[in-house]
Image (tube, rainbow, N blue to C red):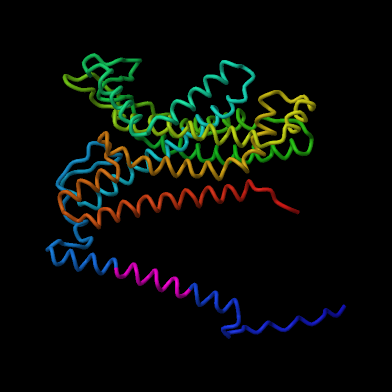
Amino acid sequence: MNRPPAPPPKKKNWSWRSQAFRGLVYQLLALAVIALGLWYLGHNTLVNMRERGIQSGFGFLTQTAGFDIGESLFAFESTQSYLMAFVVGLVNTLRVAVLGIILTTVLGTLLGIGRFSRNALVRGLCQAYVEFFRNVPILLQLLMWYLLFTELLPDASEAWQVGSVFLSKGGLNFPVPIWADGHAWAGIGLLAGLVLAWLRSRWARAQFEATGQPRSVFWVPLLIVLGMTVLGWLLGGAPTEANYPSKGEFAIENGGALTPEFMAVLLGLVVYTAAFVAEVVRAGIGSVARGQSEAAAALGLSRGQEMRLVMLPQALRVIIPPMTNQFLNLTKNSSLAVAIGYPDVVSIANTALNQTGRAVECIAIVMLVYLTTSLATSALMNWYNARAAIKER
């Protein structure tokens, strides 16, 4: 069978009468004006700084920092460079942001679902939570939590103790395992368990679509993950040695610790942002047609199955975009941690600025950090949004 000849390619019209050509010219002119404006601002700033004898450039990053950082996931000494200090601040920022996003998603989703509870007390408590915490400024909430941790808790000598866990003004102290090969095997088992749990969840959903019989997509995958992790731990020799905290003369010594600053920042951000996430989830569930709930009840699904299998999957398409905004707000609001002394990237930048006088450079680094983290979060959520979107056949 002979195919018809392909149509000849359209010739590009480079005349001014072409709307496409004019649009291209206008866009190039706009980019040139923006680039010229940025160059002028940068050149003018450098000239003014030079006239006032202010040093510029990022060469200070290789110089010795000369200050300690009170909280770090890895060792940092004052003899290390400013660059390593900024890395510590970045890690502390990401630590709060990632944990905050996870906890906020869980708490906000539960609160949003609770707004549809048939129990009037549960609905009322969820609504009261939302109306209270979202209407109090986040900075005041951070200060409130910090004062609660540092003023109401006892001193280290009288720390509250539950087993080997201590809670005092110095923070939360807990046992940490002493690293051994068995922990690496446990990590491998955890990764393998996550893969198997994902495959099992896909199979369960396929079976549900084919037969209509619901299968566990939470408890069984959870048992798979836990079982594979324990199996890896056993294969690695089942190490049980740990570093336990103990009461010292002035502080809790040894073990792991969460400082009051970290706990106040994390708790404040989670409690505040969860109130907004709850409203996002409530609006998403409310956007699903009421007939879907009635159809689920007609099929004999329980209230929990109705919410998990029918309402939430359809509401995701409405929930994801505004949820992304709340994740971005949480990450950017973490910069307020400097108010209570948590050494995030903003705090490190302030210290470096005061010591070196490189204001433009330090501010540029902070802007780059938050711009990068926000763009990465947006890209990840946009990818997930595309997966959850309705696919037309």
Q: Is residue 178 visible?
A: no
Q: Tell me the residue at 21%/51% (across/down).
A: 82
The C terminus: image quadrant:
bottom right
Residue 4 higher or lower than 352, as above or below = below
Q: Residue furthest right?
A: 1
Rendering quarter of residue 53: bottom left
Decide if residue 372 is on the left or right side of residue 12.
left
Q: Position of residue 246 (x, y in %)?
A: 25, 20
Which residue range is magenta in the image? 28-40
Q: Tell me the residue at 50%/77% (across/down).
A: 25
Q: Nearer the viewer, residue 239 or 215?
A: 215
The N terminus: image quadrant:
bottom right
Q: Residue furthest left?
A: 53
User: Main SS of the magenta segment?
Assistant: helix
Residue 256 higher or lower than 346, as above or below = above
Q: Position of residue 188 (x, y in %)?
A: 48, 40
Rendering quarter of residue 19: bottom right
Q: Nearer the viewer, residue 162 or 42?
A: 42
Number of numbered discs: 0
